Image (cartoon, grey):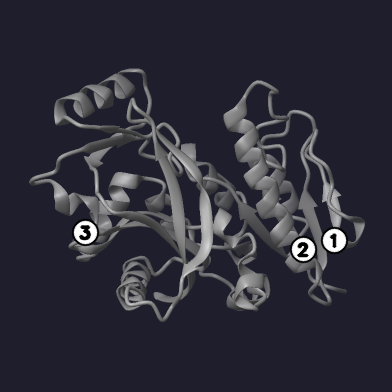
Amino acid sequence: MNPTLFVYEYLSGGGRGAAPGDDAGHAELLRAGRAMRAALVAELAALPGLDLRYACGAGVEALPAQQGAAVCPRPGETPAAFVQREGAAHERIWVVAPESDGLLLQLAEAVPPARWIGCDRATIRLCAGKRATLAHLAAQRVPTPLDFGEGATHWVVKPDDGAGTLDTRRHAQRAAAQADLWRRRASGASATVEPWVDGEPLSLSLLCQGGEAELLSINRQHIDIAADGQLHDAGVAINQITLDDGRAPALARIAQAVAHAMPGLRGFVGIDLVWHPRRGPVVIEVNPRLTCAFVGLSAALGRTLAAEILALHEEPADAAA
């Protein structure tokens, strides 16, 4: 029998239900989720000897029949219960979900570690806290915004467990940032404040295993800042800076430093950073999962990244992870 693999992309898999027609933010996230699902499933479906299934939520179109079988959550079934049920029926589970509200960790905990494709639970838990991640990296002498406390001219407030630019606002005064932080925390929201780092926003796509990282691509992030300081993600352009660029060695060193500091990173990993005009790369956050930069990356590199990631998981992960 062929090995069985289940792909669960949270948004297209019904994690938040059908997108409300007036919720532009949700609709945009759903488009991104569908694109990641389509890219991943298409690569996996082209591999020989794999019995592939993927999650498909209500109101989301199924993929072509030759790309595997769609599996729908039961009415009222939570994402964790859905993944746990499918995890018991498949040899491998590949989940794409945000760290927000502990979601990715909950899904990882619903699956036996030996069946999980991705980073280990301890690393997912760490990456879910943006401030904790920066503190951990700073302790390993990885450059972060925490190095900019003295002399910072702007400050940024964001959800401590958020993803990307969601609910992220830049302030020109520390007092305004602190007031924003207190308002969020008073309402029960998770929030953190950190110095704003000027420079070019980039992201790195990596393959990680056992404290080592291969830098796959250097991507440009397009981020708009509204008049009120609100940040908006305007998309990512993959593989925009070649690996023979003058900045590439420093970026490769940062990738390796992050992997060394977080040996539980496994498979595809994204790093968001800013290239500061004087200090070079400064890490903003680590995404222990597939990101939007995966879409189109295999074709751009002439590689089948999904197959390479599966190969990294041929040996079972530590059951205590």
Q: Rounded to the nearest whole Å, what is the CA distance between mark 3 and mark 1? A: 43 Å
Q: In this figure, which residue is indicated by the disc labeled 2?
A: 42
- Residue at 48% x, 56% y is 121
Q: In this figure, which residue is indicated by the disc labeled 1?
A: 67
Kind of element beneath mark 1:
helix
Q: In this figure, which residue is indicated by the disc labeled 3?
A: 138
Task: Pick whichever of labels 2 and 3 is earlier in the sequence.
Answer: 2
Task: Pick whichever of labels 3 and 1 is earlier in the sequence.
Answer: 1
Q: In this view, does 77 lie to the left or right of 312?
A: right
Which amino acid, mark 1? Gln
Q: Rounded to the nearest whole Å, what is the CA distance between mark 2 and mark 3? A: 38 Å
Q: Is residue 7 left or right of residue 140?
A: right
- Residue at 61% x, 32% y is 26
User: x and y percent of residue 28 in the render?
Assistant: 61, 37
Tag 2 and tag 1, C-beta contact below 8 Å: yes
User: x and y percent of residue 80 in the render?
Assistant: 63, 42
Which amino acid, mark 3? Ala
